[in-house]
Image (spheres, coloured by chain):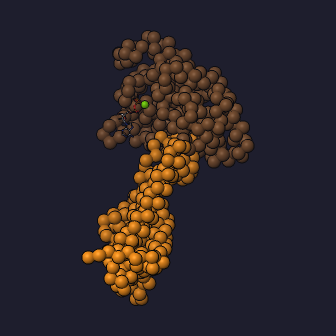
Amino acid sequence: MIRTCELKKSFGTNHVLRGINITISPHEVVVIIGPSGSGKSTLLRCLNLLEEPTSGKVFFRGQCITDPHVNVNEVRREMGMVFQRFNLFPHMTVIDNITLGPMKVRGASPEKAKQIGLDLLKKVGIAEKENSYPSELSGGQQQRVAIARALAMKPMAMLFDEVTSALDPEMIGEVLDVIEKLAEEGMTMVIVTHEMGFAREVGDRILFIDEGLIVEEGPPEQVLAKPRNPRTQAFLSKVL
Amino acid sequence: MTLDFSIIPGIIPALLLGTRLTVELAVIAVAIGLAIGSFVGIGRVGSRRIVRTITGIYVDFIRGTPLLVQLFLVYFGLPQLIGRPVPPFTAAIAAMGINSGAYVAEIVRAGIQSIDKGQMEAARSIGLTSPQAMRYIIFPQAFRRIIPPLGNEFIAMLKDSSLVSVIALEELLRKGQVIITRTFRPFEIYMVVALIYLIMTLIISRLVAWSEKRLKVVD
Ligand SMILES: Nc1ncnc2c1ncn2[C@@H]1O[C@H](COP(=O)(O)OP(=O)(O)OP(=O)(O)O)[C@@H](O)[C@H]1O
Ligand SMILES: [Mg+2]
């Protein structure tokens, strides 16, 4: 579904990604872990071209999307993204946040979009908040709206960037539950997280990234419990 | 030295006539400024290098030179190029509008840039095009932040419009001067003129403060 080939990204002289090769199959849940500043967010943002790679290629459903002729808007609508800081649109109600994409990008009718929105709000467990503004919601509720907003586009894949890092501890569970439900439904997902327990539970595969390179990858039982690489071991001993 | 305010009631109608022209000048100038400033402000943050350079030069030139000089360029300078005189009202509106455009452009630019980067990214991540993201996400939020400084720009224009008195346009200040040549009471009349400006600017700044509070509620 998603593949990268020698993906590199530099900010000036700061070489953040130094040659990333990953392949993500349909329905696979890949969890990316690694120290702060190792390039996890940058990698995720290169996948949907929010960040333009310096070199290398990104393929999505067989198409090379780093090709300059590709319409990035058509690619992005197929890849949902959820951010650490929610980034809900504060001047719109919850339901308007969700229906904007389907209406303006997919051309759905207002009624159709609203139905999609209400179904998704039910799915993430906040059906009653339809007409609230984001500022009236708790962090956990806001993040679930953000997930619903991304899902409303009926994306082929979802990208999650530390979506629980800005949340109070008691709200983390409700957001992770939604992601787990998506995993069970077979959504293809790339998840950056610091929640190791969650990574083990939801991940089909773990990638450990350090200094812009994938240092170790494998099933959660192996990478998290019996890491081979010394850098993975050092990182895990710090966070576990 | 004695002050004599007894002449004031008699000259109020004339001053109000001048006030009307002052308000007209400011309103039209800021309206033109808004039209120019919106495009220029967007151009300033756009991705086109050439547009950023040109709009940058415009803004720097206008903000770095006195309005009075700009007015003279239009009123006295332009006729030399086009071969016929420019009517005072047209010259005043043109100079003030172009001047206001540069200040409004900076207000618009600052308003757009004050919106968190995450908003644009979230908008793009659901597949909105850049113009769509601007229209539905960035502008509506920037607009709320632009209202108060725009009110201040209007106040500035109201006061600066007094400069066009030098090209014989009978706005508030010029009206006062004309009356002084008849009555020889400069202190009283300039005081009244000042008071009329003050009343207008106070009303607008109150309106701005009120709108600021109203718009905060939704944020
Ligand atoms: N827009 C940018 N401009 C310049 N440098 C950037 C930019 N975005 C990221 N970086 C740099 O890239 C490096 C990696 O950042 P990135 O956000 O990808 O790390 P991360 O692994 O997600 O870290 P964290 O766990 O703290 O979120 C950092 O050194 C950061 O300063
Ligand atoms: Mg990050």
- B14 in relation to B104, above or below: below
Determine the image quadrant of residue A100: top right
| Residue drawn where x is 45% and y is 64% of the image | B200
Q: Is residue A16 visible?
A: yes
| Residue drawn where x is 37% and y is 18% of the image | A235
- B146 in relation to A55, above or below: below
Residue B44 pos. (x, y %):
41, 57
B165, A61: nearer the viewer:
B165
| Residue drawn where x is 44% and y is 57% of the image | B205
Figure quadrant of the C terminus of chain A: top left
Residue B41 pos. (x, y %):
44, 58
Figure quadrant of the N terminus of chain A: top right
Chain B shade: orange
Q: Is residue B90 visible?
A: no
| Residue drawn where x is 50% and y is 51% of the image | B210
The quadrant of the rendered image in which ligand 2 is seen is: top left
Residue A170 left/right relative to A114:
left
- A40 in relation to B75, above or below: above
Q: Residue furthest left?
A: B1
Chain A shade: brown
A50, B110: nearer the viewer:
B110
Residue A107 left/right relative to A75:
right
Residue B150 pos. (x, y %):
45, 58
Residue B27 pos. (x, y %):
49, 68
Residue B99 left/right relative to B123:
left
Q: Residue furthest top?
A: A226
- B78 in relation to B115, above or below: below
